Image (spheres, rainbow, N blue to C red):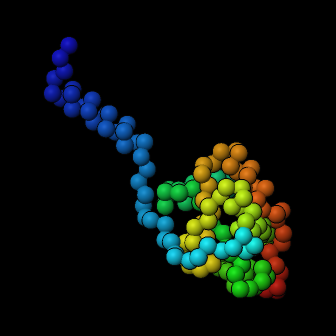
Amino acid sequence: MRLRPAESWVRAQASLSLTLDRFRVVIKPLPLRADVPPDDATVVLRAGLMADESVRRAATRTFEIYGVYGLSIEAVIGRSVTEACQTSERIANYRQVRLSTCGRLRGEGFALLASFEHPHFTLVLADLSELTIARLQVSFDAEIPNPGRASRG
């Protein structure tokens, strides 16, 4: 059976549409800095409770914008945890924070990219599988009250 030109064109368009659905358009590149990576002892903060589903939502949102599954974290460099929590616009309003170190995160196989403004980093997740999320959860201490919020009065 021979296809008419119109049928051939429709099939080609359907095939092209299926092919394009497999690719995701990156809206913009992740803004990276040329910082020296922090040493393993450097403390990092993640605001909030980090429930599995909220981690997936945040990482998916980052993927849709920048093409990488990532979470925002902040390094505590040249200041205390309390000072970091007080002065960071990203962290100051959260009731809870979770702490880790660059070494613990790297030890669990996560990469840290110096992104946006210092001291922000993007913690890169390979995927959103249960195993990856479980590794992420054990990489951080349990949540604590945000010490910067308490001192703001």
Q: Is residue 8 visible?
A: yes
Q: Does residue 36 lie above or below 52 as drawn?
A: below
Which corner quadrant of the image does residue 117 belong to? bottom right
Residue 134 vertical position relative to residue 62 in the rendered view, above or below: above
Q: Is residue 140 above or below residue 19?
A: below
Q: In terms of depth relative to the viewer, which is nearer, 7 or 126? A: 126
What percent of the width, then of the height, locates residue 68?
A: 53, 57
Quadrant where the C terminus is found in the figure? bottom right
Q: Position of residue 31 (x, y in %)?
A: 49, 71
For residue 37, side relative to residue 17 (left or right): right
Residue at left offset 76%, top offset 67%: 100
Residue 109 x %, y %:
67, 55
- Residue under the image location 16 percent in, 23 percent down: 4
Q: Residue shown at 62%/65% (left/top)?
A: 112
- Quarter of the image containing the N terminus? top left
Instruction: Please tell me whether residue 35 is drawn above or below residue 107 in the rendered image.
Output: below
Q: Nearer the viewer, residue 68 or 54?
A: 68
